[in-house]
Amino acid sequence: MEKIQRTLAMVKPDAVDRWPEIEKIILEEGFTIVERRQVRLMRAEAEEFYAEHRDKPFFPDLLQYITSGDVLALILAGEDAIGHWRRVLGPTRVSEARQEAPGSLRARFGSPHNDSHNAAHGSDSVNSAHREIKFFFPDLTLEPVLTGEGAKEYLSHAVSPTLVKALTELCKVRPEDPIVWLADWLLLNNPNKSQHNQ
């Protein structure tokens, strides 16, 4: 099994209005959307985010493009999330994406009139993903994703005992709205409640 990774995905200004279609693809591809944030980047922020391209001839156009409207920043999680998301995106240039990967996001949502208006971004390495996630979500603390035995152990010790009690009680009471009842019960009977209130 591949290692669970997180990557930054960014829907660029000219594709934000296509978000429902893009979200559907993301979910169909098996990603989990950990966090999302819609923001309008200021020029200085865009320069910081794309600092590695500062000396390239396309840099001024890139800044103008990325600051022309809101972007949607997402943290995606999944097996080999970085490589998987980049395959879903397709080649960087829209014309290449349309030729080589016609089903890719950039082929479908990128501008047919401007090769660099390619609809979306994805981190290209573990280091980039870490830096880019911190850029958009500076206050977010992400613990390593639990898998395998670690996940089973966590669920069996921290979640299952309380959940079993709640579901047993739910079956006895049979409330009209079981989800709301369950949420209320869990809040009232949270075994960690006293720790949180201190």
Image: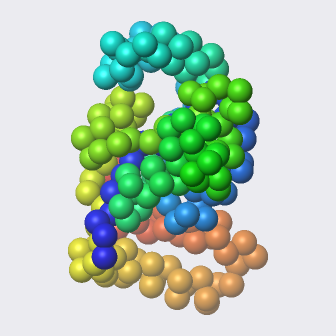
Image vertical order of residue 79 relative to residue 57, above or below:
below
Q: How far from the left and from the top, in percent, is residue 11?
A: 58, 37
Q: How far from the left and from the top, in percent, is residue 138?
A: 34, 31
Q: Residue at x 48, y 54 (%)?
A: 87
Image quadrant where residue 173 sits: bottom right
Residue 32 shows up from this direction: no
* Along the viewing direction, whichever of 41 and 108 lies nearer the viewer: 108
* Along the viewing direction, whichever of 17 and 62 lies nearer the viewer: 62
Q: Residue furthest right?
A: 176
**Color scheme of the displayed model:** rainbow
Image quadrant where residue 1 sits: bottom left
Image quadrant where residue 40 sits: top right
* Along the viewing direction, whichever of 114 and 71 lies nearer the viewer: 114
Q: Residue at x 55, y 63 (%)?
A: 29
Q: How far from the left and from the top, in percent, is residue 183?
A: 56, 65
Image vertical order of residue 62 relative to residue 129, above or below:
above
Q: How far from the left and from the top, in percent, is residue 90?
A: 53, 48
Residue 70 shows up from this direction: yes
Q: How many marks?
A: 0
Q: Residue at x 58, y 45 (%)?
A: 97
Q: Residue at x 28, y 66 (%)?
A: 3
Image vertical order of residue 74 relative to residue 2, above or below:
above
In the visual, does 183 lie left or right of 9? right
